[in-house]
Amino acid sequence: MTPEAPPDPRPGTRPDLIAAGLGVVLVTAAIIIGTAIDRPNGTPGSLHLNWPPLYARWSPHLGPGTPAALAVATAVIAYGPTLAVRLKWRALVLTALAASTAWIWSLALIDGWHDGIAERLTTKHEYLQVIDRFDDIPATLRDFTNHILMSSPDNWPAHTAGHPPGATLTFVYLDRIGLGGGAWAGVWCITIGATAVAAVLIALRALADEETARRAAPFLVLAPAAIWIGTSADGYFAAVTAWMIALLALAATRTTRFPAAAALGSGLLLGLTFILSYGLTLFGLVVAAVLLIARTWRPLPLLLLGAAVLPLALTLAGFNYWEAYHLLVERYYEGAGGNRPYGYFVWSNLAGTVLVIGLATVAGLRRTLAAVPAAVRRLRTGETTPADRLVALVLAALVALLAANLSGMSKAETERIWLPFATFLLPAAALLPATARRYWLAAQAVLALAINHLLFTGW
C-alpha cells in the first residue's frame, strides 16, 4: 500500500491547486513584464535576457533525446510511486540514481550532443576557457585577484571571476588526468549532479524517516531542475552540497557505523562548497537546521575541522578569499548585474525557481508553510514527527534561497545558481497526498519537457 502523506492543517486538493495556480500567475507575470521592460522598442535592454525570467531563447525543437525523455517520464509517472514503496531501500536508492541519470541525459540530448553537452561548458563565460592559464597553479592562485575586475588586464571570464578557484580547479585537474574538453566536463557534471538524488534520499531517511524518503523519491527524480543539471557546473555544486548534508545527517543522527568519519567527510565537502561558490556559504543555514533537527552539536568540531582544510590549502597557496569576494562584488556591478533592475528580479527570480522546482513542489511548499507553526512547537519540545523534521529541512533551504534573493547578488540566471537550494525544496512534494501523486508527477514532466523543447537554455 502506498504510504499516505502526513496530516495537513488545511487538507484537500483545492489549496494545493490554488498554490500551483499562483505559481503559474507569477511565471506569466515575469514573462510579460520582463519582456515589456527589456524590449520596449523590440531590442534587448537592461535585463540582458532573451526570454525573461530565464537565461534562454525561444527555439522550438525536437532532438535525439526526445524519445528517451518521453519514455523516462512515462515510466516514472506510471511506476515510480509503486516502486518507491516496494523496492528494498538500497535498490530504491540505486534505481532513483539510475532514473535521475537517464532523465538528465535525455533532457540534455534534446539539444543534441554538441549543443546539449559537448559545447555547453566551453562558451566564453565558462571555466574551460582558462585551463591553459593554470599551468602553474600556485602562481595563478597568487595572481588570481589581479584579474577579477573587468578593467584588469586579461580579466577572467564571468564564471571564473564569479567563483572561488575551486570550481575552475576541478576542470583543471580533470584536464590533467586526460579528461579535458567540453564533452568530459559535461559528462562530469551530469554524472556527479545525478547523484544528488541519492544523497537527498539518504538525508531524508536519516532526518525524517524512510517512508518520507520513499514518498519524495519520484519527485526528486522527475524534477525540471534536471534541465540545468545537464549541463552546468552548478549541478555538480548541488551534488556536493547534497552529499555534505547527507553525511552530516548520518553523523548527527548516528545512523552510520562511523559517525565521526561522516562528520569529518561532511566538513570536507562543506569546505569544498566554500571554494566552489561564494553564495553557497548560505548553506550554513541548512547545516544548522540538520543539527537542530537531530538535537545535537556533537558533529560540530569534526565538521568545522574538515571545513577548514580546503579553504586553508587555497589560502596557503596564495589565494585571498576575502579580497577576491569584494572584488567580485565590484565586478558584478561593472557588468550586467549593475544594469539589471533589482525591483524586477527580486520577484521574478522566484518565478524562475517555480520553473526549476515545478508546480508539485510549489504545492508541497504550500503544505510546508502551513505546517510550520505546529512543527516549530514540537521541535521545541523534541516530540517531533517525521513531517515536522521534513518541514524544518525544507524551510531552512527556502530561507537560504530567499536570503540569496534579497542580497541583490543573484539577479537572473538563478535557475542554475540556486540548484543546490532547489534540491532541498523538492522533498516538499512528499507532503502531497498519495491519491494525487501521479497527477503531480505528470505536471513536473510536462513542465520540464515543455521548457526543454520550446527554449534553448543558456549556461
Image (cartoon, rainbow, N blue to C red):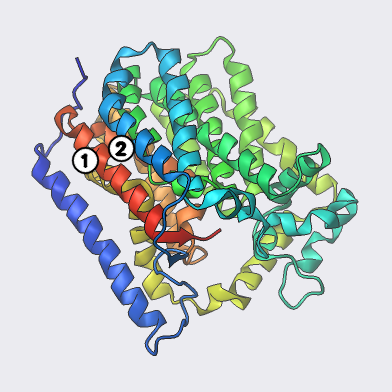
The quadrant in which residue 77 appears is top left
> Mark 2 and 1 residues: CB-CB less than 8 Å, in contact?
yes
Dot 2 lies on which element? helix
Q: Secondary structure at mark 1?
A: helix
Name the residue at 28% across, 30% down: 388
Three-letter amino acid code of the residue under disc 1: Arg
Report how many numbered discs are placed on residues in the image: 2
**Quadrant housing residue 259:** top right
Dot 2 or dot 1: first in sequence order is 1
Write down the residue under mark 2: 428
Residue found 51% across the figure and 44% down from its top: 283
Which residue is rendered at x = 31% and y = 50% of the image?
447
Residue type at tag 2? Ala
Q: Is residue 96 left or right of residue 263?
A: left
Vertical position of residue 398 compared to residue 208: above or below: below
Could you say where residue 205 lies in the image, as x and y percent from the top left?
A: 39, 21
At horizontal 47% and vertical 20% (from top left) the residue drawn is 94
The answer to whether residue 397 of the structure is visible from this angle is yes
244 over 341 or under it: above or below: above
Badge 1 crowding class, 10 Å Cα cut-off, few under 14, some 14 to 19, many 20 or more, is: many
Q: Quadrant of the C terminus?
A: bottom right
The answer to which of 35 and 26 lies nearer the viewer is: 35
What's the distance in space between the residues labelled 2 and 1, CA to CA? 8 Å
Which mark identifies residue 284? none
Residue, disc 1: 367
In the picture, measured across the screen, residue 52 lies left or right of residue 20, that is: right
Check the image and name the residue furthest to the bottom. Answer: 41
- Regarding residue 424, the answer to whether it shows in the image is no
The image position of residue 22, as x and y in percent, is 20, 57
Mark 2, other Cα within 10 Å: few <14 / some 14–19 / many ≥20: many
